[in-house]
Amino acid sequence: MNDKQPVNPEATGPEDMEAAPDPHSVIEKLVAENNELKDRVLRSLAETENMRRRSERESADARAYGVTNFARDLLSVVDNLERALDHIPADQRAGANEAFKALIEGVDLTARDLGSVLARHGVKRLDPLGEKFDPNFHQAMFEAPDAEIPAGAVAQVIQSGWKIADRVLRPALVGVSKGAAKTATPG
């Protein structure tokens, strides 16, 4: 017989032997790791949902306000067309020859068409005549006594304002009523 015994690779000496781990501590470790992984997954899902909502909101804002600068630039064109029409006296309109009437009608149609194009893109005119003065939408240019209009109401619109969705593109330039003029009381 051979003095040497075959070496068993699975057998270890006493120095290599460790105490078997406690099953309860292993379970506790696994439960803690499981809870940590669940927390990570839930946080990742919440972050993904927040990102989706933010993207939707930014996309909606881009659709609603994407034409803001372009619309703001077109407002002067609208103003100029309206000024041109307003400066034609009514008697000259009535007595105008056919060519001049056609020109007036063309400018009027152009102004209305431009207004409807702006409206289709969410740009709306602010005509606050008679409304309560709102500094969010109106810019007061002067204050005047007016017995027929209550104090703090818009008595005159100097220039129409415009808004896109809920944002002001240009505030309306207005005159605000102080109410009836105060009369001096004899003293």
Image (cartoon, grey):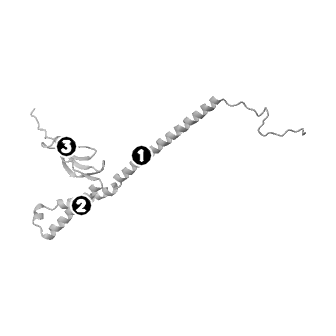
Q: Which residue is identified by label 2? A: 113
Q: Position of residue 109 (x, y in %)?
A: 20, 63
Q: Position of residue 28 (x, y in %)?
A: 60, 31
- SS at badge 2: helix
Q: Is residue 2 above or below residue 141?
A: above
Task: Determine contact: label 1, label 2, CB under 8 Å.
Answer: no
- SS at badge 1: helix
**Circle nearer the viewer, 3 or 1:** 1
- How far apart marks 2 and 3 lie (CA) works out to 31 Å
Say which quadrant the N terminus sits in: top right
Q: Nearer the viewer, residue 163 or 15?
A: 15
**Circle nearer the viewer, 1 or 2:** 1
Q: Nearer the viewer, residue 118 or 107?
A: 118
Amino acid type, label 3? Ala
Among the 4 quarters of the image, the one containing residue 12:
top right
Q: Which mark is residue 153?
A: 3
Residue for point 40% across, 48% down: 56
**Circle nearer the viewer, 2 or 3:** 2
- SS at badge 3: loop
